[in-house]
Amino acid sequence: LIFIGGALFYTAVSLFKNREFSLKINRTILLILGLWLGSFAISTIFSIAPTESFWGLYKRLQGTFTYLLYAANFLICLSLFHKDKFKKAFLAVVLFSGVLTAIYAVSQRFGFDPFIKGPIDILAGRSIATMGSPVSLGQFLIFPWFVSFVLFIDGCKKRSYKSITLQLLLLVLFSSAVYFSLNRASLLGIAVAVAIWAVTKIKTKRANWITACALVILTIGGLWLYSSQKFGASKLFSGRSLGSIAVLWESALPLISEHLLFGSGPETTYQTIQKT
């Protein structure tokens, strides 16, 4: 944490010394960020374990100090992204890392893994790639998926068939990897976001017809997967974790009432949850 904080501080000082650098950030974003950090600060002050809430635990690093670093990194990146060269570099890195991870995840699903010998039964056949867990894999791939989706839409507007073909292939790759992670939250998040985009952005009749046909195809494909129980569909549509989630939420309700205004503090869940 000290190393990361020092690196961010050095980067910030170097940027402010640069005459071409300007901190042009929307006030609404600053307000939201301030409220977000303020909630952490207040919760830490009234925490049942203030020291742990500020620094976090060694295994998790989810204390307030970590989120201060996240905020600093966010502001630095937001300022840098005013220049196109930084945007292009960032998108290229996201796509490149996403492609490598997705290829690994897909190959892992079919038993080709140079690091894990044998089938990945330890995670019930769910791909993890280099992320450590299927949930982390699904969440990570959301970023390259939407980068590729935006570039695909941009290619359609410019009628660049080379870009359209490339991004379509990447979308298929990323979608396959997310599916093989069997992370329902990521799949649902992508589906809802695309549906909202389609409703709010698509205006022409032709585009509406294309979108409607795509939704019909996806629906039919989902029903086919459900009925055939292929490619892990039985695990995807099962209630594998709903029972444990219900137990956790039921246990959390009394804890919320005990610390209703300010919470028990960041990184104190393991202490408060023991009561239930």
Image (spheres, rainbow, N blue to C red):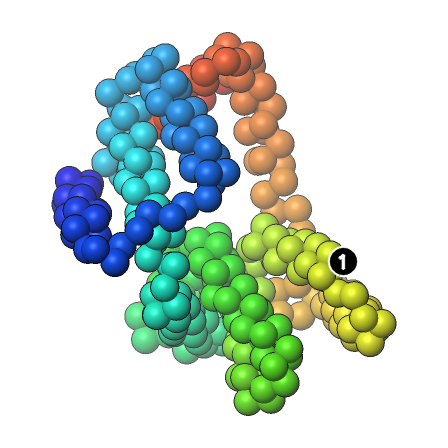
Quick check: 71 left or right of 14? Answer: right
Query: Which amino acid, by three-letter code, is at mark 1?
Result: Val
> Relative to the observer, which residue lies in front, 254 or 80?
80
Q: Is residue 6 visible?
A: yes
Above or below, 216 relative to 131? below
Identified at 32% across, 30% down, the residue is 64
Residue 110: percent from left, percent from top = 49, 76
> Relative to the observer, which residue lies in front, 75 or 254?
75
Residue 132: percent from left, percent from top = 37, 56
For the N terminus, the image quarter is top left
Identified at 21% across, 48% down, the residue is 16
> Relative to the observer, which residue lies in front, 74 or 149?
74
Identified at 27% across, 25% down, the residue is 54
Residue named by callout 1 = 199
Identified at 64% across, 77% down, the residue is 157
Residue 101: percent from left, percent from top = 40, 69
Q: For the residue labelled by badge 1, is the local secondary structure a helix, a strand or a loop?
A: helix
Residue 153: percent from left, percent from top = 62, 73
Above or below, 258 relative to 241? above
